[in-house]
Amino acid sequence: MTQTYVKILGVRIDKVDREEAYKRFLNLIKRDRVSVIYTPNTEIVMMAQKDEELKEILYNADLVVPDGVGLIYASKIHNLGLTERVAGIELMERMLKFCNSTKQSIYLLGAKEEICKSAAEKIHELYSNIEIKGYQSGYYSPEDEQKIIDTINELKPDLLFVAFGAPKQEKWIHHNKKILNCKVAMGVGGAFDVLSGTVKRAPKIFRNTGFEWLYRLLKNPTRFKRMLALPHFMLKVLLERDMKQ
């Protein structure tokens, strides 16, 4: 049987391109249990080097897409078979289009209140057939968490998008997936910022050439420390003699 994933520095990444990732989502939403989708980039893979819980969570997900050009470079160096980056925001947008055509429902959880609200409004504007069951900022006290989960479960959204940032969103979804009443839960990082218009995606020339990270750095130099994960990642990849699948 052909293996459907590879391991990059010990982290599971599914062997999917954009079309295959979307097809996998279409199968997941038909299931009678909660399915989870994560979108790790090189920074998250580096987090997992020091966080065994995160590594285990990614391994046990239903779909883990390669949302980082560094992962594609690593695959090419070690001949692992990944063919293209699958950007989480682009997969999310295709999922929204599907929900719009099938009149399914969503719930947004995470980011600041004004950003979360604005993202919900923008989704409603672009995809009028989607039922937005509700939205909740990620800035809440721990004692309110169960109440928020109860609200989500009462509303029964088809899709739950969680935008806490990594690794918090992955851990939140993993720890709660057995009690969540939705079909698919997906960690979407900064997607609400993009959807709300607060943050603009890099122009296509940057995205298509693998330099979206450079555009982000130029727009926000304070990301420099975070961006150090990319050269660190590539060095580890180059020094890795046998990156087993």
Image (spheres, helix red, strand yellow):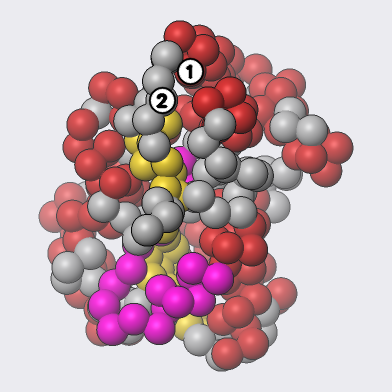
Residue range of the region highlighted in magenta in the rendering? 23-40
What is the x, y in percent for residue 84? 65, 44
Please state which amino acid type lies under the numbered disc 1: Val
- Residue 23 left/right relative to 7: right
Q: Which residue occupies 65% across, 17% down?
A: 221
Q: Residue 10's image quarter?
A: top left
Question: In the displayed structure, does residue 164 sit left or right of residue 84?
Answer: left
> In this rendering, does residue 49 appear at all?
yes
Residue that mark 1 sits on? 237
Q: In this rendering, does residue 70 appear at all?
A: no
**Is residue 39 highlighted in magenta?**
yes
Image quadrant in which you'd find residue 150: bottom left
User: Dot 2: within a 10 Å radius of its alpha carbon, few (fewer than 14), some, or many (20 or more) residues?
Assistant: some
Q: Earlier in the sequence, mark 1 or mark 2?
A: 1
x and y percentages locating residue 132 in the rendered image? 50, 79
Label 1: element kind: helix
- How many dots with numbers? 2
Q: Residue, x 63% and y 68% (percent of image)?
A: 94
Instruction: Please provide percent x and percent y for residue 49.
Output: 31, 23
Q: Quadrant of the C terminus?
A: top left
Disc number lying in front (1 or 2): 2
Q: Amino acid at mark 2?
A: Met
Residue 172 counted in the magenta span: no
Q: Nearer the viewer, residue 32 or 221?
A: 32
Residue holding disc 2: 243
Q: Nearer the viewer, residue 229 or 244?
A: 244
Are the residues tagged 1 and 2 within 8 Å (C-beta)? yes
Q: As rendered, which of 30 and 133 lies closer to the eye?
A: 30
220 relative to 182 in the view: left or right: right
